[in-house]
Image: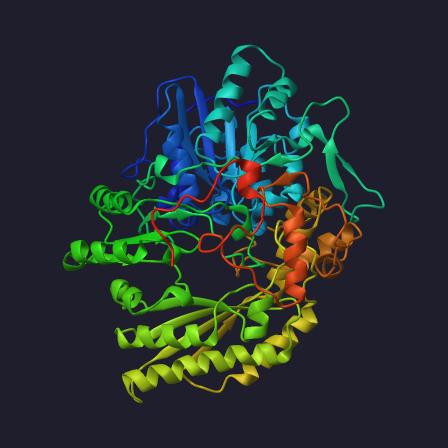
Amino acid sequence: MRLAREDLFWRIEPLLSMVERPSRYLNHEWGAVEEQPGPFHVCVMYPDVYDVGLPNLGLAILYDELNRLDGISCERAYLPWIDMSALMRERNIPLLSLESSSPVASFDIVGITLAHELVCTNIVEVLDLSGITLRADERDEDEPFVVAGGPSVWNAEPVAPMFDAMLLGDGEHALALISECVRDGRAQGLARVDILRRLAKLPGVYVPSLYDVVVDQTSTRWGYAVPKEGESVPEVVYKHCIEHLSDTEPVAQRIVPYLTVVQDRLTVEVLRGCARGCRFCQAGMTYRPVRERPKDQIIEAVNRGLQTSGYDECCLSSLSTTDHSQCADVLHELYAELGEKGVRVSIPSQRLDSFGVDMASAARSSRKTGLTFAPEAGSQRLRDVINKNVTDQNMDEAARNAFENGYRRMKLYFMMGLPTETDEDLRGIARMAERVAQIGREVCGPRSRVTVSISVAVFVPKCQTPFQWEGQLPLEETHRRQHVMLEAATDRAVRISYHDAETSLIEGVLSKMGRTGFDLVLAAWKNGCRFDAWTDQFDFDRWNDAARGIGLDLEDIACERFDLDARLPWDHVSPGVSKGFLQREWRRAVDEQTTKDCTMNSCTGCGVCQTLRVSNDLAGERQ
């Protein structure tokens, strides 16, 4: 049953003195939008605490976009931390929105961001705390429509039973169409299922309840989804794609929080998509084609955003910012304008092969915090396997350029457990880091405080990538390889950290499973699993017990390899990259052959432009 819209802040106000960081639950931040006039209400939800969710650019874009529309009011909600959740349950207080303190269950639409696989149990917690019926097919006619979107929607089958609809691809404009469809359908008195059928006709909208799961000899054990008999829905749902990023609002992030949050700075998205073609990278496949924002629009957006927010740092965000055809010009101009004002302009990660002297000079306002590069693998052979088209020479030149321009700290990202990896590849990680440290001492002097930090993640095969058929490393082998890498590092200037193997295993399990994976998610939540992305909250034993209780083995699931011709649990949704292209890239990986970037060379035949009728949209010529 749908709850009434009313301001219930008076119910949580007495709890604020009893919880950690009470400002997580306050409204009226600078830049927030008060309730808009109009009868239709949308709540966009990030299923983690406020400190993590507020900086999320995707949520900010949707919030800004919807509140520009007449007759639609959009508010935000976040998952309360465990102390507040416990108090709310004790006092029977439902989850509330931030702006009006209305019950989340009183909204017409609740949109939840699937940021990564480890938020699955948080989504169960969100719906349960809200009082919204957990399974979409059991909801009353007047309950909210629960919609998913975000970077991990490409295999959302393990949480699909909780969602009325899922939005694939770019959310701008698409969520507005979804909102208008639900609003108009309810105004016409349509039944819930008929509104769902209308939603399924919108570009990029997948309605799980209109599909059945089939398991046969052509599939994996998790089956594949097909339209239900009699339902006129597409066999494959392709993503919604915005053709020109310049047509969107460049300053979507307007809210200034009361407390320090992660990534506490202004963020401006400078481009969307990446055509580098790294074979492990889901985002690189699912966000195609490449669309750049023009230089003048970026500079205007940064200045306007800083003026309205008061931040002293701006991040130029994208999957690969230094690939932007005008990146060096943008950085030079921003530094000239903002350097004397004490404003720092940062870029999240730099490409080794594009970080020359000019880029090092342009990015010099980041010297206090250092530079970040992602070689991903410790040998050229393995970098060819994963299509990371950078060389040892690129790394050495980038390091020398950085140290000569005043940097003293460098962070390098790698992965372990990549297909065909050997112990020699792992030792290569330590050797590369030590070589970078040595270059730093050569340039800066033997007594300089040069440090090189390396962070090593466990490779998790992701859907919609050329490695989606691959298996993950067993826990024991992951621990062994971590030890091999640590033993190889002897330079005191090199600091090594690595991801937790057990957490990565759960991520791999949820990346692999089909719709029956919801049984595991629900069992884990009932076992007390939530906030699994938080190191101090993650409990592998609870996940293991949940799996055993329903007859599953976590390692068996994560380590399973799929046949290259099998029908996969996610084949019914597509970012436009063809399965044939992914199969071809898998074969090229095995043969250690690389594939070029189509923004700098000819078309590679991924199929995105032809299928979605879009193309790369560059602001200038890439080199």
Q: Nearer the viewer, residue 166 or 584?
A: 584
Query: Where does the image place residue 362, in percent across and percent down from the top left?
Result: 26, 62
In this rendering, the answer to whether 23 lies above or below 376 is: above
Q: Can you name the residue that lies furthest to the left here?
A: 340
Toward which corner of the image does residue 215 lie, by quadrant?
A: top right
Quadrant including the C terminus: bottom left
Quadrant including the N terminus: top right
Toward which corner of the image does residue 457 lie, by quadrant?
A: bottom right
Residue at screen point 33% across, 52% down: 316
Query: Where does the image place residue 550, in percent across and percent down from the top left?
Result: 78, 49
Q: Can you name the residue that lies furthest to the right here?
A: 217
Q: Which of 35 and 251 is in front in this view?
A: 251
Here the colouring is: rainbow
Query: Where does the image place residue 433, in percent across and percent down from the top left?
Result: 45, 78
Residue at screen point 52% across, 23% down: 3
In this rendering, the answer to whether 213 lies above or below 470 is: above
Toward which corner of the image does residue 167 lie, by quadrant?
A: top right
Residue at screen point 72% across, 52% down: 546
Q: Can you name the residue that lies furthest to the front here?
A: 602
In this rendering, the answer to whether 145 lies above or below 150 is: above
